Image (cartoon, rainbow, N blue to C red):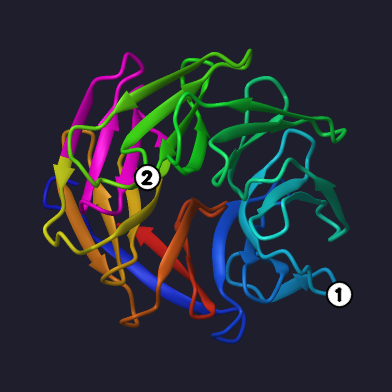
Amino acid sequence: MPQGSHATIREFTVTDPEAGPYGIATGPDGSLWFTLVHEGRIGRMAPGGEADLHPADPLPDGPMNITAGPDGALWFTCLRGDRVGRIDTGGRVTMFEVPPGGPCGIAAGPDGALWFTLMRTDRIGRITPAGEVAEFPLPVSGAMPSMITAGPDGALWFTLNQGNAVGRIAPGGDVAVHALPTEGAAPVGITAGPDGALWFAAIGAGHIGRITTDGKVTEFPLPDPGARPHAIVTGPDGALWFTEWGNAHVGRITCEGRIDEHPLPRPGCEPHGIALGPDGALWVALETGALAQVVPG
């Protein structure tokens, strides 16, 4: 895209504005799966189709983030209830108790298990598809581990929202913590980039960060310091795409650091999760009741 970034954006209403679409992922069935944090349900929608919601009776725990698991199902965290859930592509839900601590981010690891953060207890959790749970303490206090992703080095990488750092945990449990140069960065979303590094969204400082697997950090300030970048994912075009919660935009940053921003159709739509969809578009969960399809072009 030598002339800059261009995108076509369409919005699809999936729930009422109070339901709260938050996390989003592509499932093995070629559908988009998303959490309704306030309504207590999981939504499923084929691109351009109608949404259906599961289970019939709402979950009381506030499903938050969601990811595709290694077992052909979707796995999600329940921040309020200290549980991790599994939903198969037929909509059947199984819930697993996990150690108290506020499970938040979740990602499939290289070891065939799901890894999740425990925000309130400075721990990282691990759950197998069979439901066996382990937890690993972090060498920090009050750091609030937030989002987590599988890295290119066979480890899991996670943000420490109140610790001003990015952490790494190997499948065996060894932990390293890398401090960020900007105080109050408050990193949230993190993803593996196409360049062999990890990229993260610093909601507090208004920038996108890049960290190499040996801990070198580069920061890229956004045009609007109050943009509040939240979630980030590698797009189909070799760039990183991210949500800007504070100003209702979707941003794009190349591996060289060029930034472009695209306004979403409705101001104040509260974009949170972002995922690469089965149709090659980016899909964004809007907490005001919709999903946005962002087609680079």
Density class for disc 1 (Cα within 10 Å; few <14, some 14-19, many ≥20) is few
Q: CA distance from mark 1 to mark 2?
A: 36 Å
Percent position of residue 186, x then y = 32, 47
Callout 2 amino acid:
Gln
User: Vertically, is 151 above or below 98?
Assistant: above
Q: Is residue 290 magenta?
A: no
Q: Name the secondary structure under disc 2.
A: loop
Give the residue number, with chain letter if any, for mark 2: 162
Q: Which residues are magenta?
A: 191-219
Which label lies toward us, 1 or 2? 2
Q: Please indicate whether residue 6 sits to the left or right of residue 173 in the image.
A: left
Q: Residue at x 37, y 31 (%)?
A: 166
Percent position of residue 154, x then y = 54, 16
Q: Please indicate whether residue 277 sits to the left or right of residue 37 in the image.
A: left
Q: Residue at x 56, y 70 (%)?
A: 21
User: Vertically, is 166 above or below 265?
Assistant: above
Q: Quadrant of residue 182?
A: top left
Give the residue number, with chain letter if any, for mark 1: 56
Q: Is residue 217 magenta?
A: yes
Q: Name the secondary structure under disc 1.
A: loop
Callout 1 amino acid:
Ala
